[in-house]
Image: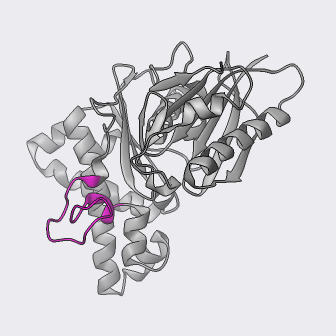
Amino acid sequence: MKTRLGLDIGGTTVHGVAVSADTHDVIGDQITHTTRRGADGVVASAVDMIAALEAALPDGHEVVGVGLGVPGIVHDGSVTHAVNLGLDHVPLDLAGHVSQRVADVPVTVENDVKTATLGGLKWLREQGSTVDDLALLNVGTGLAAGFLLDGRLRHGSRGMAGEIGHLVHDPAGPVCPCGRRGCLELYASGSGLRRQWDGTAAELFTAAETDPDAARIRDQLTAGIAKAISLLAYGLDVSYVLVTGGVVSATPALRDAILTDLRSDEGTSLGRLAAIADRVRWLPSDYPAGALGAALLGTPDAPAPEGTAWRS
């Protein structure tokens, strides 16, 4: 059976899945390893995960493609500006390095939020949807989006499409690691929450009932994520905005607050027409969108990837 492997390489863990090349169904168990940082560490993490996935495959399965989803800017199989992986502005030819150390199959590399967008599309298909346009908002350590427009992933002229976390939200706010001041992800992300609150989002919402400072942080988090969703809906008029990430997935009270914020816009005629809250879908926390989307890279019905390399 022809099989594809997908890896979602994050700053903390590498998540891997094997899928049928024909049906795109997951084969066997999902595997998680700890990520090693730096150029050599990232390559080794990918190669070790590929070996683990291959070892777990039943007899008779032939690996015909490997997809890697990584944070940062991806161009022609190379990665830059993946700070959480210890990669800076110096390009790492991840597709080339990995392809030299695995079996003779194509290795494809794509930005991790974009691979999650492909995985999100598969999830929508499983729910019966036939749309071919959506935005996926990832509320993770940072804040970023992926776009699927008319059935194709949007990368942008410089590979930066969806980097909305670095739009300035408060010009008087704190300095962001990117060098700007008051970026949106300083308020509407996991790192933004940790910057202001020593606890989980669920604990924040509980404390906010009696603590004015917690209420302020709660309102900033809610408003920031709602603003990001509105930017995607108004800017691209997509059919759905899929929202994913541990901060949102683990906190029903936050999801409810975001929808309440979005519905407050429906007091205007334009807001009623936009109906943004109705477009929001919460991607299940246990759905392996990133790894699954990576596995689908290079398939006939997947949008063109950023970079593919073959072992020489």
For the N terminus, the image quarter is top right
The magenta region covers: 166-188
Q: Position of residue 210 (x, y in %)?
A: 36, 87
- Vertical arrangement, residue 15 with respect to residue 182, above or below: above
Judged left or right of residue 16, residue 299 is left
Snapshot quadrant of residue 217: bottom left
Q: Main secondary structure of the magenta part?
A: loop
> Is residue 32 magenta-colored?
no
Q: Position of residue 297 (x, y in %)?
A: 54, 24
- Vertical arrangement, residue 260 with respect to residue 111, above or below: below
Q: How is the image coloured?
A: one colour
For the C terminus, the image quarter is top right
Judged left or right of residue 253, residue 223 is left
Q: Residue furthest left?
A: 269
Snapshot quadrant of residue 188: bottom left
Q: Position of residue 142 (x, y in %)?
A: 40, 56
> Is residue 171 magenta-colored?
yes
Q: Is residue 275 visible?
A: no
- Vertical arrangement, residue 146 with respect to residue 196, above or below: above
